[in-house]
Amino acid sequence: MSFIRTSHHILHPDSGHTLAEHEVTPRGVYEDRRSLLKGLAAGVAGVGLLGAAEALAQPGGAPGLVKRPGKLAALPAARSTVAGAYVMDKLTPHEDVTTYNNFYEFGTGKADPAENAHTLKPRPWTLVIDGEVNRPQRLGLDDLLKLAPMEERIYRMRCVEGWSMVIPWLGYSLSHLIRRAEPNSKAKFVEFVTLADAKQMPGLRSSVLDWPYVEGLRLDEAMHPLTLMAFGLYGEVLPNQNGAPLRLVVPWKYGFKSAKSIVRIRLLDKPNTPSWVKAGPQEYGYFSNVNPKVDHPRWSQATERRIGEGGLFAPRRPTLMFNGYEAQVGQIYAGMDLKRNF
Amino acid sequence: MSDVMLQGRLNAWLLKPWVKPLCWLLCAVPFVALVVAAAADALGANPAERLIRETGEWALRFLWLTLLITPLREAAGLHGVLRLRRPLGVTAFVYAALHFLAYAWLDQGLVLPDIVADVFKRNFILAGMLALLLMLPLALTSFNAAIRKLGGRRWQMLHKLVYAVALLGLLHFYWKMSAKNDVGEVMVYAVLLAVLLGWRVMRRGGILAALRVR
């Protein structure tokens, strides 16, 4: 326990009070951290083992993967064995997944990214991993694609605006990537920095957000096997409007946590301030876990509209705790006040 | 052609008997377009959200057009446009009512307790709801017999409420869109309303004077 610096505090957005780290990090997690870090050094994360063990209990062999629409380059993958990586819900049509997007770098309208993102150049691409790590990394896209076996995962995606999709992603657990950089003992949080290039991104002309768009996760969240570094969807490489060439997908958090077109991953000893927390600290929290009992100040989060399901008069469906991933991720928030740490 | 001649022609044209029916017809175009698009499943990935948003925006647009009548009449000398104020105002109310209906139905499944709870929990919905409620007496007195019964002065006093409705409508739109910092379009509406109301304040010589029934 000695390496946990309880003296340092996390600034709670705009509320004028600070949180001691032990308030944000549940006991189990920071007590486990030593073993987690040992596991990291050994190349096997504790949570990863747990995930694999659960996966063995899952039924089914290796059925066919989702059919690709044939619009972009194929990205071969195998069905994921990570627990919770395959939801049974009906897929949201490819058309909707690729034309209804929030990607403010290409405009604030939902149709803007599909219209404007053709100017994004996903190749060549370099990802930097640095900060509190022993082996900083500078990886090209081809290295990234080969770094771990590509898996297909079908996740629910719940937007903070009250709509949701079901998307077949391609990628691998972010933990593979982070482990490669060997986080040191000070590393407790992860920052994701996304591309901000006005030449490629017309939306940067507007000051709607403070560019570049940044997001953040606690290290144990980032190391969770469900936290996906995605390189594709629907059997193909990522369309530009969906965050090409690589993006984060954290299925139990509101969609804006899943940063697109990432250029840098920084391991930190304290949490960063994600873009939406900076823009509206009363409305957006660091964690932003999907929670039907904690409303956004301007709208209810109790229900959601599933895109592409049942037409205009389809009733909204109830939103599930942690977007339905409570069995997989609930324990990492044990003992935490989720209303305060929204 | 001189300005006076143009003015005269436009006024003569505005007095033609088919102008008012044509205005009503044009007012219905966005509604028909939305219904056709909905039936053809051409409203995009989230048709419910689109219908709610479009009906709300059309309510604002028609309200802003209604507020344009007086400046057109007084500053541009187009007396004939007064005939169009009622169709435009009533249309603004109809789109606002459709906006509420779309929200209540598509978002809340017409469950009354849910709607009531939602309205009082969310400031931006409350502002929109107030705007709609304030429009109701205006819509209900938008026929000649109501004006006769109320008397012109009292009717005019009542209809000053339209300024409150416009400000509440704008606030409602702003509160909604600012949640995701998406206020570019709201700002356009704000500037236009500032011009429409500012013109009145300047012309009458002060805010109180602008609110006085003449």
Image (spheres, coloured by chain):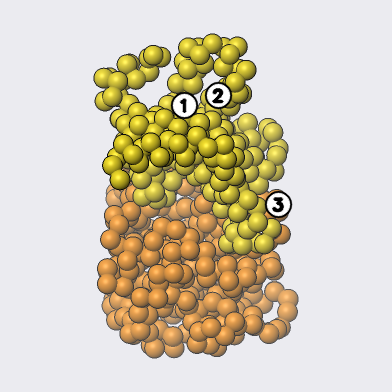
Chain colours: A orange, B yellow
Mark 3 residue type: Phe
Task: Label 1, secondary structure: give it.
Answer: helix
Numbered tag placed on residue B18 in the rendering:
none
Q: N-terminal of the two: label 2 or label 1?
A: 2
Q: Are marks 2 and 1 on the same chain?
A: yes
- Residues tagged 2 and 1 counted as in contact (Cβ below 8 A): yes
**Vertical side of B17 occupied by A252: above or below:** below
Tell me the crowding category of disc 3: few under 14, some 14 to 19, or many 20 or more residues within 10 angstroms, Cα based: few
| Residue marked by disc 3 | A313
| Residue marked by disc 2 | B138
Q: Are marks 2 and 3 on the same chain?
A: no
Q: Residue furthest right?
A: A59
Q: Nearer the viewer, residue A193 or B190?
A: B190
- In 3D space, how far apart are the residues under numbered discs 1 and 3 (Cα atoms)? 33 Å
Quarter of the image for residue B113 reads top right
Q: Are marks 1 and 3 on the same chain?
A: no
Q: Position of residue B154 (x, y in %)?
A: 50, 12
Mark 1 residue type: Val
Numbered tag placed on residue B162 in the rendering:
1
Depth-wise, is mark 1 or mark 3 nearer the camera? 1
Q: Position of residue B72 (x, y in %)?
A: 37, 34
Q: Chain of mark 1?
A: B
Q: Nearer the viewer, residue B189 or A183?
A: B189
Could you tell me which residue is drawn at 58 percent across and 71 percent down? A95
